[in-house]
Amino acid sequence: MTLGVLAAVAAASSASSDVEPGVLGFLVVAGMGVALVFLLRSMNKQFRKITPEPGPVSGSGADGHEADGEQAKAPAQTPE
């Protein structure tokens, strides 16, 4: 019996329901967009602070041999 009542209510409400996001939906999406712009600006500022580590350039060396990748795999040594 309750399934019949629920089906009747669902059929009646689906015919008359126009769901629109409205102003609140627009404000939420616009707020997320503004937050994204500020996050991207902050991320770019942080990336500009990073300096590349000095060392040999990967690829072919001066003598024509391939650079050994073992140095890149070794963990950095910290001063004691």
Image: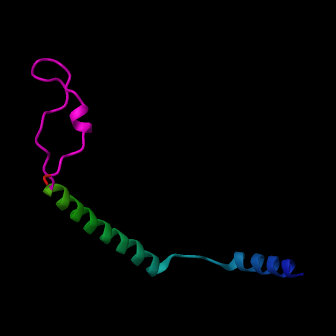
Residue closest to the far front:
80
In the rendered image, residue 54 lying in the magenta stretch gets the answer yes
Residue drawn 12% across the image and 38% down it: 55
Indicate whether residue 49 is drawn in magenta: no
Expressed as whole percent of the image width and height from the top left, the position of residue 25 reads 46, 76
Where residue 79 appears, as percent x and y from the top left, is 13, 52
Residue farthest along the top direction in this orientation: 64
Left or right: 52 as drawn, with respect to 9: left
Image: magenta residue range: 50-78
Residue for point 13% across, 33% down: 56
Quarter holding the C terminus is bottom left
**Which image quadrant for residue 63?**
top left
- Indicate whether 58 appears above or below 5: above
Residue 61 on image: x %, y %? 13, 24
Q: Quadrant of the N terminus?
A: bottom right
Residue 5, by quadrant, is bottom right
Whether residue 40 sits left or right of residue 65 in the image: it is right
